[in-house]
Image (cartoon, rainbow, N blue to C red):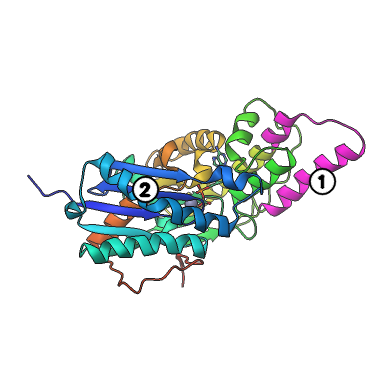
Amino acid sequence: MEKRNLILSFESSCDETSVAVIENGCKVLANIVATQIKSHQRFGGVVPEVASRHHIEIITTCIKDALEEAGVAYDDFDAVAVTYGPGLVGSLLIGVMAAKAVAFAHHLPLIPVNHMAGHIYAARFVDEIKFPALALLVSGGHTELVYLPRENEFQIIGETRDDAAGEAFDKVGRVLGINYPAGKEIDELAHQGKDTFHFPRAMEKEDNFDFSFSGLKSAFINTVHHAEQIGETLDKADLACSFEASVVDVLAEKTIHALKKFPVKQLILAGGVAANQGLRERLDQELKAFPDVQLLKAPLKLCGDNAAMIGAAGYVGYKHGVRAGLDLNADPSLEFDWINE
Ligand code: KG4
Ligand code: ZN
């Protein structure tokens, strides 16, 4: 029997502390996710100092739980993988330090992982990734279209010029009185309403692969404030539906535009906003016009931040000889290269 490769992976870029045990880059033996959402909710967003403090407090428990759940010991591992960016520097550093400590103490190679590559590789738990591929990456901090010409290569072809899609969901949620993070609740509300407000679809028809969501956010906030001033009550479900329809329209249109320009074998949908039902349904529909392109949606449970996806991406880096020394540092603004750079 072929030897199995086991990776211990760490994710702590924002407000989730997560440790996973991944076999051969595609099987989850454990994926412990300690979320801090409750601590940040009263502030309406993530407070960096609070986040790092929580990571420190919980990370060793997460390691212990992951090893226990997977039924493995440190000696069983082939490598340690860790998110080193992008994200909050204080948060990233906790995962990086923990991963380095394990790698040093147990003489294991250390694999640095870009958080966004991790999001893409969440799709690896559904099926093998076939190249070339295109990824629509939509999260709280990022919205980008990424071309993957071959394994372990990521090239940005377009990105948001202002707010990320998830950020827009969260800001609009605040106006609707919905707790942070608001995406899931707005999504549920949207399915009970109609697109009656017809908010703008920024840059939808432009011949590029960039996005913009700040105009939509402003249009939404102005509509709600104006109604408040004249004492009118707007239907929350219709507001949510109209907002989501605009976001989904723009994301879908730009992705289709990219599929026409970049013939690929797969379209990967990943990141926290990839859990959006409206977006998943819309891409299912649109992809019918591309019978040669397989739509690979990250599993719902692995759309948000987690270490399993870091283990899957880390395995690819491991196979390709990507290694970091014990001087690895967090890189809060780490980015993929642009396609023509
Ligand atoms: O990828 P992620 O967990 O964290 C970052 O790396 O940013 O994404 C979190 C974002 C939040 O903005 C949250 O509101 C959004 O994903 N989100 C959703 C849904 N579930 C989570 N947005 C729209 N629809 C959803 N169902
Ligand atoms: Zn993320």
For residue 95, side relative to residue 182 (left or right): left
Residues 179 and 121: in front is 179
Residue located at (47% from left, 65% from top)? 335
Can the viewer see residue 151 in this picture? no
Query: Within the displayed image, which quadrant is ligand 1 positioned in?
Result: top right
Q: Position of residue 167 (x, y in %)?
A: 62, 50
Position of the N terminus by quadrant: top left
* Label 2 residue SS: helix
Residues in magenta, as a range = 213-242
The answer to which image quadrant residue 27 occupies is top left
- Work out which residue is located at the far left of the displayed protein and give it: 1
> Which disc number belongs to residue 324?
none
Residue located at (58% from left, 46% from top)? 39
- Residue to which mark 2 is pinned: 61
- Work out which residue is located at the far right of the displayed protein and give it: 230
The answer to which image quadrant residue 231 occupies is top right
Residues 139 and 84: in front is 84
Sequence-wise first label, 2 or 1: 2
Q: Look at the image and say whether residue 13 sits in the magenta stretch.
A: no
Q: Look at the image and say whether residue 216 sits in the magenta stretch.
A: yes
Q: Which amino acid type is marked by label 2? A: Thr
- Residue to which mark 1 is pinned: 222
Residues 79 and 51: in front is 51
Q: Residues within 10 Å of mark 2 (few under 14, many from 20)?
A: few
Q: Which amino acid type is marked by label 1? A: Asn
Residue located at (32% from left, 52% from top)? 311
For residue 176, side relative to residue 297 (left or right): right
For residue 128, side relative to residue 55 (left or right): left
Q: Position of residue 339 (x, y in %)?
A: 45, 66
Q: Position of residue 328 (x, y in %)?
A: 36, 71
